[in-house]
Amino acid sequence: MNDSKEMPSPITISSPLHSLPGVGPARAALLARLDLQSLQDLLFYFPRDYQTVHRSITIGELRPDEMASIDGEVTEIELRGAGTGKSILGVLIRQENAFLRAIWFNQPYLAEKYQVGQRLQLTGKPRKRGLRWEMNHPQVVPLDDGYSAPDRATILLPVYRLTEGVQQNFLRPLIARIVCEYAEIVPETLPAEIIERHSLASIGQALRGIHVPQDDPDLARAKRRFVFQELLVMQLALAMKRHRQQLAHAAPKLPNDRRIDGRIRRLLPFPLTSGQEQVIQEICADLAQDVPMQRLLHGEVGSGKTIVAVYAMLLATVHGYQAAMMTPTEILARQHMLTLQRLLKKSRVRLQLLTGGMTAVERRNAADVIREGNVDLIVGTQAIVLGELEFAKLGLVVIDEQHKFGVQQRATLKQASLDPHYLVMTATPIPRTIAMTTYGDLDTSTLRGGPPGRQPVHTYWGTSEQRERWWQFVANKLREGRQAYVIAPMVDGNDDELATVEAVYESLVHGPLESFRVDIVHGRMSANEKELAMTAFREGKTQVLIATSVVEVGIDVPNAILMTIENAERFGLAQLHQLRGRVSRGPFSGYVCAFTGDVSDEGRQRLEAFVRTNDGFELAEIDLQLRGPGDLFGTRQHGMAPLRIADLREDDQTLQETRLAASDIIQADPELQQAGFERLRAMVLRRYGEKLALSQVG
Ligand code: ADP
Ligand code: MG
């Protein structure tokens, strides 16, 4: 055993970088600045981008207006007209005895970027000016020491993230050398059959393809392998979680039949749409099983999700079980309570509200009757219901407008014996890829279409010159008996624009709406105050309601058909669409006018999309493209590890492929115990074990 001290220890992927030939302590210290400690760290330090370098030709070979690359040395940098707004930067490049001038207009800061003596490759369209060649705005690649011209038409150079004292020309050749030497010792994580079935590059090939790609297809193949692996690990974790949930938990069977269905339908105030029928069928199929339903219902704003939930809840009560509906806001809880009271007037179903706005005594009493089984349907705000509440016999939990909650909060209700079924409803449609990731442990139902007779909403993006006309239009409609919302992004603050509810209120009651009954509602008011304001509005006593986005979620006042959104650029696309959903609830056409302050480029695209289409499914996809999945739906807060390599905007196809593969694998081998899957299983647990609570069971 002592022998091993004398023998050079073999290099493994966990070897420290200083132990590698040609690295040593000084270089290892530099690499440590990037948090690279082991061989593995370095091999998996992926480029953030790639630069295409073309094979250079000589200046003598240039043809006018033909794209070409030339190498040369900077001999002169001349900046004219800096500081005047119009500048010309000329960088003279020498190649033996020939010269070419690179020219940039109005980018004076580039002068700092280049130094005399530096070697550059320039790519662009050359022009002959007298005897000398010029290139306007060429693409530039600095040629590092030791760089050799490519022997192919183009090569791809990796571009790494750098830090103080660590340069591209240090990192690039170092990583290239290490990768070529050691990529093959990295143990394969994926089982051979998966590699084969999905035509993936091996880990060694992929590492080389990522760091030293031969060409675009080579790079694409390498990327695909890592994207596939990352998504497969995630989908395996989600499939494992689903499987365990079904295995470890039993839920009450709540079967439906004609008699029950008839009893429920008699209570409903309208015939269901075909979309509603469809999702109710999907839900009932789940509820009939003794494994807990874990279903996501998403659909267009105003498509009628509430009644679907009511149907499912009534099915639970028919079987003697309680059902609880949770909402993100108190206003919405109270509204659902009203709806249920109206629907169930003639039935014996007992209702109980439970919100933070109730007094401590009221809440305690509510908790008592819920525990003793003296109520059937409970409607409450999520925060309260998730507290220490005990249920006598909980069969179904509905979570409305899930948009606002985190995933972890989703399923932590206390329950004595059987687990309840879960129905999660989102505020707006969600992109397919988000359904497969953030909500990937749920089955999905999609509610399309809306109730019949729904009128279209007209959406405008108003300029400040159009304000007067808009308010005249609003006033006319108010005189006809309609009602209006005005939305501002903030409650108060020292903003003198129309960003706050207060400022909007002042400007309207002393201006265009002075002869109307105007009120305010926002999240800072007490539950009681909010309730009073909402009731007055619902009953038509208030004509105009100025609000923050608390009205965003779920509020249903069909006579309110006008909406003005101030500082609309401060709202997300899903939020805007959700807001618009407030004014398309009844028999009248709705009108939305968005006014904006300074708008960023992305904000402009968002508003243009908002005006262009009223299709929530389309808007959800646009939102994903514009913002990226990190922000969208708070993917991070939802507890899913952020993706490092895969991008949900591009890797839709691979996501689907891995989802199917994962589901097959877990079905055959729920705990990934078959030979060849050890590393994959370890990766799944390392990355998602804690997040999805996979480690405790199994
Ligand atoms: P959301 O899906 O946004 O939660 P709601 O459930 O609040 O939508 O429904 C929006 C409006 O449509 C409500 O006023 C509701 O009563 C009405 N509604 C729902 N389904 C139907 C239907 N099948 N026929 C007529 N009106 C319906
Ligand atoms: Mg709703």
Image (cartoon, helix red, strand yellow):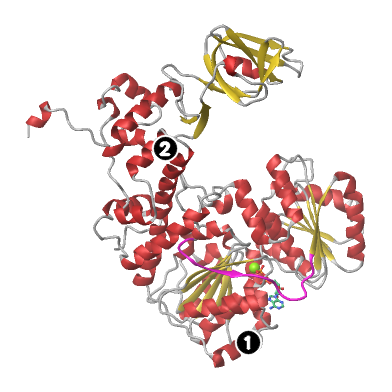
Q: Can you say which quadrant of the picture contains the C terminus?
A: bottom left
The image's mark for residue 607 is none
Q: At label 1, which amino acid type do we have?
A: Arg
Which of the pair 417/600 is nearer the observer?
600
Highlighted range, magenta: 440-456
Residue marked by disc 1: 265
If you read the primary sequence from the N terminus, does the residue marked by circle 2 or circle 1 appear first? 2
Q: Within the magenta stretch, is there residue 451?
A: yes
The relative height of residue 24 versus residue 471 in the rendered view (above or below) is above
Quarter holding the N terminus is: top left
Disc 1 crowd rating (10 Å Cα; few below 14, some 14-19, many 20+) is some
* Viewer-nearest residue: 213 or 373: 213
Q: Is residue 125 left or right of residue 288?
A: right
Q: Percent from the top left, x then y, of residue 61? A: 58, 18
Which residue does the image show at 60% across and 76% down from the upper left? 308
Which quadrant holds residue 298? bottom right
- Element on which disc 1 rests: helix
Any magenta on residue 80? no
**Residue occupied by mark 2:** 210
Q: Say which amino acid is labelled 2.
A: Ile
User: Label 2 crowding class (10 Å Cα cut-off): few <14, some 14-19, many 20+?
Assistant: many
Q: Residue at coordinates 62% horizontally, 67% vertically from top-left?
A: 299
Q: Residue 490, can we see it?
A: no
Ligand 2, seen in the image, is in the quarter at bottom right
Name the chief secondary structure element in magenta.
loop
Q: Check if mark 2's residue and mark 1's residue have beta carbons within 8 Å.
A: no
